Amino acid sequence: MHSILIKVDRYRYKMDDVFLYLELLNNITMGIFAVNLDMEIVFFNSEAEKITGFTKDEAMGQRCYEIFRTELCYKNCYLKKAIKEKKKFTHVRNTILNKNNKEIPVDITVSPLYDIKGKIRGGFESFIDNSLYVQLEKELYKNYSFEDVIAKDEKMVNLMHTLLRISQTDIPVIITGETGVGKDVFASAIHNRSNRHDKPFIKVNCAALPVSLIESELFGYKKGAFTDAKTDKLGRFQEANGGTILLDEISDLPIELQAKLLQVLDEKEFYPLGSKKPIKVDVRIISTTNKNLKDLIKNRLFREDLYYRLNGIEFEIPPLRERRSDIPLLIEHFLDIFSKTYNKTVQRVDSNVLKALLNHDFPGNVRELKHIIEFGVAVSDNNEITYESLPIDFRKKTESKNNIKDSYIKASNSYEKEQILNILESNDWDIGKTAQILNIHRTTLWRKMKKYGLFNTHVA
Amino acid sequence: MRFAICSLNHRVAPLINHTKEIIVVSKVQKKDISIKEIEMASCNALEILKVLKDNKVKTLICGGIKEEYSQLLEKNNIKIIENVIGDIGDVIKMYLHKNIHSNNTKRVRIAK
């Protein structure tokens, strides 16, 4: 096959050779399509079908922008540009909307398409599904959008609609919720949807910084402010100027710094350490915490005035156990991600796994589910996660919960059996009287007696 | 019967957020059809919902639709017929002849 290809004269294609090329293009693991000068699709390979969800039959003859549906199509179409400028563009990043209306990040390469006389006949585009790469990038830079929030639960959907409304304002936001619910994902999404999205998004973890460093970290310092201050240092607030600052675990901000933060909020300016000149900043503040700030205020650990200044809007992300209907959706999402990460084809979890996951309380929330699925995909040998391929810790918890449930059922059964037996004996095994005392129907009593093997052997 | 189509350059907008006009079609009697074209200054989900509600539209025909739009519209009881491709005139004709359904999305090919 290779020798034939090499020997083919560039300008004299035989029909067999054309079929050979088409076969080759169809089997390549990269989406490929070609358009004529009217931007109508004239070639669409199998991988393009897989990535877009549209069949070849559906796509052929359609205008490419009506199949690929990207934001760039109308504003800055690289394929059109390639045809017009007779140039090749490589590794352009774009996002298509597939047939299921899911956004798929792609990496595209475009070039003009010539006929054998060297005349431009259209354009040619190759593209690969870049989801995994983008996902890793998001994890690395914590750069999320609302599309990254996987939820169908009504509470979550309502929450997202509220956030969509407030994201374009400058209202300070407090996000609360248990650990692992995705508070930072929401914070990043609010920033990326705001008018400040092209400005910095700076995250400060108040719990991770030593108390002695927080002030200089947040507000910076001037050269000579202390022994080791050899040069001026910008604080996080200055870095975030024009954008958004995320104060993660705000509840851990030392009380003495809370006053300084209050000053930034009130006067939109602050003094770096060792400076007599105030610095003006325009920053939107998003704070997150897994603690109850009102309780901290009662215990004088958090300033009430600061709380009200930070709290333009406060919302709580519900824990996963309160939105169990999202579990199957999240499982599907993580299966998709980790199958790509580990180069596997795990597409589902078996019914026992689903049952165990739906019954689990997820103290670690979405993060915990994510780790369980990642483990399952990593150790799975086929296209399904079985109960045996779940982490041992999770299985132990599930089994002990089941054991408690079983022993409870056993205990209540044995209590009921004893109670029925006692009443039957004290009423000379009179079914009618016993049923009356127990306030149940005679047939129900018969059924229960049969279940517990209660028969009056003396009468028999 | 009343429905709307997201339009861009006289075709179904490939992406709902690229909608330039919303075409509201009302069939009053057997053959009487009124068509209203509403120009959209911006086409975020809330704007589109507002236009549909103001015009008492319960069915929307569109091309690609992102999650945030479909969730908001569905929550407000708007039936969405997605993935439709084609010329606005052809789409109106096909929908009136019941050739486009929401559960079996049919794409409209351009008459060449």
Image (cartoon, helix red, strand yellow):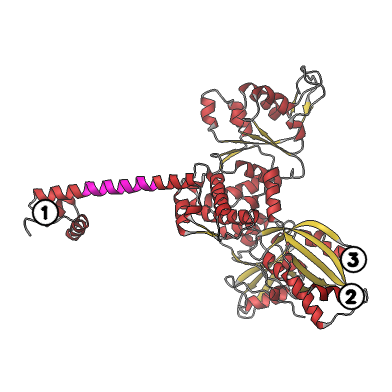
- Mark found first going from the N terminus, 2 or 1: 2
Q: Secondary structure at mark 1?
A: helix
Residue B13 visible, this angle: no
Do pointers 3 and 1 mark residues of a single chain?
Answer: yes
**Range shown magenta:** A401-416
Q: Amino acid at mark 2?
A: Arg
* Foreground: disc 2 or disc 1: 2
Magenta span has A412?
yes
Q: Residue at x 19, y 61 (%)?
A: A443
Q: Residue at x 33, y 49 (%)?
A: A406
Q: Position of residue A280 (x, y in %)?
A: 78, 29
Q: Residue at x 75, y 40 (%)?
A: A200
Q: Report the chain holding disc 3.
A: A
Real-space Cα separation, disc 2 to disc 1, in angstroms: 100 Å
Q: Secondary structure at mark 3?
A: helix
Q: Residue furthest top?
A: A227
| In the image, residue A401 above or below residue A71 | above
Query: Residue at label 2?
Result: A10
Query: Residue at label 3?
Result: A84
Query: Residue at label 1?
Result: A433
Residue A168's mark? none
Residue A276 visible, this angle: yes
- Mark found first going from the N terminus, 3 or 1: 3
Viewer-nearest residue: B109 or A102? A102
Q: Quadrant of residue A81?
A: bottom right
Q: Secondary structure at mark 2?
A: loop
Q: Amino acid at mark 1?
A: Lys
Viewer-nearest residue: A117 or A58? A117
